[in-house]
Amino acid sequence: MLWSLIKIVVFVALVGAATLGAGYLLELEGGVRVAVGGIELNLTPLNAVLALLMMVVAIWLLLKLASLTVAVLKFLNGDETALSRYFDRNRERKGYKALTEGMMALASGEARLAMSKAAKAEKYLDQPELTNLLTAQAAEMAGDRKKAEETYKKLLSDDRTRFVGVRGIMKQKLADGDTDTARKLAEKAITLRPKHEETQDILLKLQAQARDWSGARETLSLKLKQGTLPRDVHKRRDAVLALSQAKGVLDEGNDIDAREAAIEANRLSPDLIPAACYAARGYIEKGKPKLATRILKKAWEAQPHPDLAAAFAAIVPNETPAERLKRFQLLLKIHPENSETRLIEAELQIAAEDFPAARRALGSLVDENPDSRALTIMAAVERGEGASDQVVKGWLARALTAPRGPQWVCTNCHNIHSEWVPVCENCQAFDTLEWKAPPASEVSSATGVAMLPLIVGALEDHSGEADDSTEGTADDVVLDAEIVEDNPHMPDDPGVQK
């Protein structure tokens, strides 16, 4: 408001000054005489001022016309002038307009339109790092893989866009299934941009799939260094890679290196069950059962597992069932209410032929949340206590249709594995296996089938005492065992070595 008032006041002042000046010139006597080539002009003071102003304007116009003429001549000669800059700005404006429309078309899913706008922008703009990127992405969306690859290769020639080009070609190789080339491109991309998290993850996955455990550990350390991976996650995954490296060395036949690598993996992550088992067996081979016991006990504290029990049993392989049951108390007292603890104790009691104690160990497992292993153990208990064939077969029949208990399940695709592996065999995801009960619709896990020979053995031990009404009982249970073993959804459970 104040500024508008000031402008009005200034305007009025200028008009007033012009009016006063014109009045002064009109009242002024005399004039200006101009004589040129025999022509004489007599001008009043006002006319003289007006003529002077017109002459100034004419000279200004003449100078501008001369400047324009010089600019045109320079433009035709190829020099940079105001005229050339005008046309450049016009081309740049058209180019950026086409580039913007191409990006909008790409975001809208109109790949062909985006490619057309990218070509138009390329004609007006001298910025291939922008237009080539738009062209490559539009070509990928349109399914023109050849055009996309050619454009990505153009990006390799510029330091500013080399990473984008390498990453684009890498993704194409991944889509084609050429993982070896993709891994090499991912390694190149990491050298160009070490902080790029997506490329780090892709490289780690490809190295794990290729069983390049040492390279994967380097990539994992890079992720920790760049702050893209929490320290606790790094520690566990480094242990997984160390364990995988140990298994690879074991496959090559170098037991000593494998043993040391397994111990290192257990040191990095004591709660990693496979690492604890490998490390314990390594200490057993070295004649250090106390260290093996300490490792297994610490892993059992984190999570009871049948593999840990099997490794613990292997510490003293030739002990009697009673001695084994006594030694296992070290583990059984840690998580007494855990289902795995109760199942292991029941198996040990059956091996010691204390069937009532085995029933007490099972407790309410067969009623609250029964699985095939618990039901099969219950069948063994019933047979051991002298139950009829009908009762035993009833438990076995329930075992056939019951859930199979915890297994190594991929948390990414829910694929079930018979043993732990670092990379999922189905989706190729790294470190996604978890010991848990699989979804009900996909149940295919280990059961207590390992207990069936014990059931048959118990029948054979009492076959001489059976009366005529129980003839053929052993044959019937053997048949039931064969039915359970032939079930494709019931792979063998390693259980506890006895």
Image (tube, grey):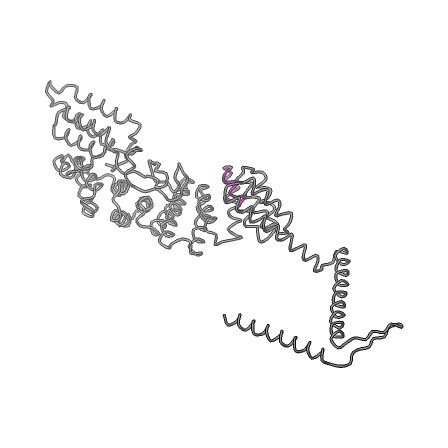
Rendered position, 387 above or below 21: above
Quadrant of the rendered image containing residue 358: top left
Q: Residue 251, percent across and down?
A: 41, 39
**Closest to the observer, 15 or 412:** 15
Residue 388 drawn above or below residue 358: above
Per the rendered image, the range of residues in magenta is 168-175
- Residue 90 picture location, percent across and down: 65, 53
Residue 183: x and y, percent? 50, 44
- Residue occupying image coordinates x 55% and y 49%: 100
Of residue 264 and residue 404, the one placed in the foreground of this image is 404
Q: How many marks?
A: 0
When asked about the image quadrant of residue 443, the answer is: top left
Instruction: Identify the image quadrant of residue 340.
Output: top left
Nearer to us in this view, 490 or 213? 490
Q: Residue 156, image x and y in percent?
A: 59, 48
Which residue ends up furthest to the bottom in the rendered image? Answer: 29
Q: Residue at x 29, y 36 (%)?
A: 439
Is residue 174 covered in magenta?
yes
Q: Quadrant of the C terminus?
A: top left
Is residue 278 in the magenta section?
no
Q: Which residue occupies the extreme right position in the image?
A: 38
Task: Locate residue 371 relative to residue 57 in the image: left or right.
Answer: left
Q: Main secondary structure of the magenta part?
A: helix
